[in-house]
Image (cartoon, rainbow, N blue to C red):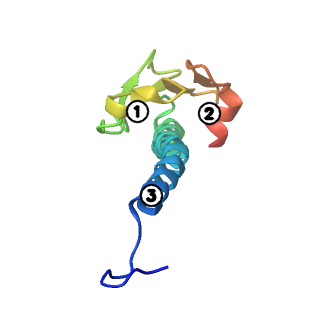
Amino acid sequence: MSRPGHGTGFTLVEIVIVVAVVAILLSMATPAYLRQGLRAHRTEAIARMLETAACQERIRAVQGQYDPAHCLPSSTTRYEYAWAGAVSNGFTVRAIPQGGQVHDECGALSLSHDGTQTANGTQSVTRCWSGR
């Protein structure tokens, strides 16, 4: 109902209700968005470790042994890559979370020459390595 001399528009109560609804929706969507970002960065780290393992296997096929002086990916703002126990007859490459990635529930990831996958966080190895 409009009063004479007043324009039509929204009341203060209507605006407050809309702002409250938007705030509630954002509070529910933000954690899911952040989890998805962590998962995407973890998937990239896993891909880099798999590429490293493939590179080491190619070196072994040619030279007859692994060569830890080659193939280690360069570190990023999200993960630092390092050898753990890299020798001529085996290797383990680790991806250690850095920056905002330290909040990922999977923690540090590792991949060994025999295909052993580990994650030292609160989530299961299967869940961390499957990309879920």
Q: What amino acid type is highlighted by mark number 1?
A: Gln
Q: Earlier in the sequence, mark 1 or mark 2?
A: 1
Residue that badge 3 annotates: 13
* Residue that protrudes farthest toward the top in the picture: 85
Q: Between marks 1 and 2, how big is the CA–CA gap?
A: 13 Å
Residue 15, how many percent across, how many down? 42, 61
From the image, state whether disc 1 or disc 3 is nearer to you. Answer: 3
Q: Are marks 1 and 3 in contact (CB under 8 Å)?
A: no
Helix, strand or loop at mark 3: helix
x%, y% of residue 56?
48, 37
Q: CA distance from mark 1 to mark 3?
A: 41 Å
Q: Is residue 95 visible?
A: no
Vertical arrangement, residue 71 with respect to residue 90, above or below: below
Residue at the farthest front position: 4
**Element under disc 2:** helix
| 87 w.r.t. 77: above or below | above
Residue at the image position 45 percent from the left and 58 percent from the top:
13
Query: Callout 1: 10 Å neighbours few (<14), some, many (20+)?
Result: many
Q: Which mark is residue 101?
A: 1
Q: Mark 3: give few (<14), some (14-19) or many (20+) Cα within 10 Å.
A: few
Circle 3/circle 2 CB separation < 8 Å = no
Residue closer to the observer: 8 or 79: 8
- Sequence-wise, which precedes: disc 3 or disc 2? 3
Secondary element at tag 1: helix
**Residue bearing the label numbered 2:** 128
Q: Is residue 87 visible?
A: yes
- Give left or right: position of 8 versus 107: left
- The x, y position of residue 62, in whole percent, is 48, 41
Q: Quadrant of residue 83?
A: top left
Q: Amino acid at mark 2?
A: Cys
Residue 85 locus on image (x, y percent):
46, 15
